[in-house]
Image (tube, rainbow, N blue to C red):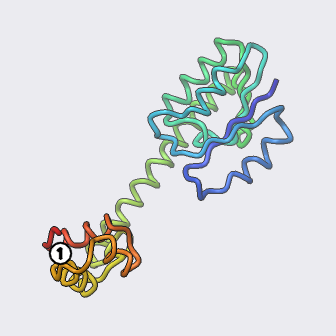
Amino acid sequence: MKIGYLRVSTEEQNPYRQLDSLTPLCDRVYVEKLSAVAARRPVFDAVMDMLKPGDTLVVWDLDRAFRSTVDAILQEERLRTAGIRFEVFSLRVNTAEPAGEFAYSVMAAAAQYERRMISKRTKEGLEAAVKRGVKLGRKRKLSDKQVRQAREKLQSGGWTRSEVAALFGVHPRTLARALSLLGSDM
């Protein structure tokens, strides 16, 4: 049996490119939606547990299945020892042959390098933006003026926190955080 495994990092990411490639090749395809570095990957673990000798695990690309070079090599060795074939769609490498195993190891290292360079460039870009005064993160829901108005309403005694939050269209916890940040815990 050919079992496909693919992963996207977030719910917003689209798995269709991987699905379109793997579905014609596989008897079943399993999709996981979480970061590759997540502590647990329940779908991946379930797929690994269901594989039997003679089966083939198919992944779209190395970085879609493994956390690091070491993880990729260890998992491939685990599969080979268990009599399970392994295919990487994007590489077209047969890991059962010495040359294929070598090529696989080199590609695993390259995938890890690429992932780390992307992370490094992202961090450098964020640092450069902060140096230029760019405010990172989500835009505040309440302006300082709105928080002051909310504080006045709460101090007047005629309003509850829930009522004031509803007035400004935010959750009461959002209002509480905004008040706290402006120096007024109410």
Q: Residue furthest front?
A: 158
Whether residue 105 sits left or right of residue 171 in the image: it is right
Q: Quadrant of the C terminus?
A: bottom left
Picture layout, residue 111 above or below residue 131: above
Question: Which amino acid is tagged 1?
Answer: Leu
> Residue 30 placed where, x, y %?
70, 37
> Residue 91 placed where, x, y %?
70, 39
Task: Indicate the quadrant where residue 111 lies.
Answer: top right
Crowding around mark 1 (Cα neighbors within 10 Å: few <14, some 14 to 19, many 20+) is: few
The residue under the point 78% across, 41% down is 22
Q: Residue furthest left?
A: 183
The residue under the point 74% across, 27% down is 94
Picture layout, residue 71 above or below residue 185: above
Q: Quadrant of the N terminus?
A: top right
Whether residue 34 sits left or right of residue 169 in the image: it is right
> Residue 138 placed where, x, y %?
38, 70
Query: Which residue is nearer to you in this view: 25 or 153?
Result: 153
Query: Which residue is nearer to you in this view: 17 or 159?
Result: 159
The residue under the point 62% across, 41% down is 32
Secondary structure beneath disc 1?
A: loop
Query: Which residue is nearer to you in this view: 87 or 146?
Result: 146
Task: Indicate the quadrant where residue 85 lies.
Answer: top right
Which residue does the numbered mark 1 point to in the structure image? 182
The residue under the point 58% across, 24% down is 75
